[in-house]
Image: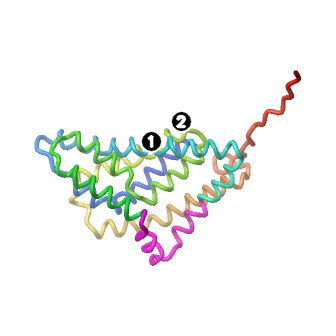
Amino acid sequence: MEIWTGFLIGLFGSIHCIGMCGPIVLALPSTSGSNWVVLITRILYNFGRILTYAFLGAVFGLFGSRLVLIGLQQNTSILIGVIILVAVLMPVKYKNYLAQTKIYQSINSLIKFLFSRLMSRKANSSFLLFGIVNGFLPCGFVYVAIGGAVATENVLSGTLFMALFGLGTLPIMLAASILGKHINASLRSKINRIMPVLAVILAIIFILRGLNLGIPYLSPKLSAPQVNTEVICH
């Protein structure tokens, strides 16, 4: 997976962010002061999200590097694509069931608790922490980006991939955090209808990449890991 595609996934996927994270953005604590103060606090919030995404990129980039060592990068790319397709086509009742699982509920409860604590703080620095916590919020599109980080196959590339993903979400998320009052439920609903199409396109890209078809950029030939066959004589 080319590193720069992280930015494109974030840029187009940020449409989904308005639909899903709109209520969170609207709930950001109000600040007293000039418009510049409001802008700075919103930038801090978004920078916090990007820090979390970069951290996740490092973790899953490391995981991807382990897969390369055992020659499973192609299978993993195909598997990620298939999982995305299954998630898109899965009936809503099963998605709701998964959302009720204990681990999902535990993560949500912890994040909501941290959100409520940060809401009560008046310091502008709390916006950075708010963004960091927000980055860990369960989100299907972030999971797609994490799949891309795994496919980069090393820690540095995974970190850069997810950082670029975060930067791609910045323009729309920054605008939403400042002009959030204009984003109503009807608009968020319309935006969410676009997301399955984008997710399917990304799934196809992951699957094609894993098929190793030799198509530049889309499905490049993946080199097999080098094995040292040198014989050392004593």
**How many numbered markers are drawn?**
2
Relative to residue 52, is residue 209 drawn left or right? right
Q: Which numbered circle lies on residue 147?
A: none
Q: Which residue is mark 1?
A: 54
Name the quadrant of the C terminus: top right
Which of pointers 1 and 2 lies earlier in the amino acid sequence? 1
Q: Tag 1, which secondary structure?
A: helix
Residue that extends furthest to the top in the rendered view of this protein? 234
Q: Which residue is mark 2?
A: 156
Against 67, is 84 above or below? below
Q: Is residue 114 magenta?
A: no
Q: Amino acid at mark 1?
A: Ala
Residue at coordinates 64% horizontally, 46% vertically from top-left? 217
Q: 9 or 126: which is nearer to us?
A: 126
Q: Where residue 82 sits in the image (x, y, percent)?
A: 61, 63
Residue at coordinates 15% horizontally, 45% vertically from top-left? 122
Residue that extends furthest to the right in the rendered view of this protein? 233
Q: Amino acid at mark 2?
A: Leu
Residue at coordinates 73% horizontally, 48% vertically from top-left? 214
Choose top left, top right, bottom left or bottom right for residue 180.
bottom left
Residue at coordinates 63% horizontally, 54% vertically from top-left? 77
Q: Tag 2, which secondary structure?
A: helix
Q: Where residue 232 sits in the image (x, y, percent)?
A: 85, 25
Q: Where residue 103 sits in the image (x, y, percent)?
A: 43, 63
Question: In this picture, which residue range is highlighted in magenta?
Answer: 81-103
Q: Is residue 92 magenta?
A: yes
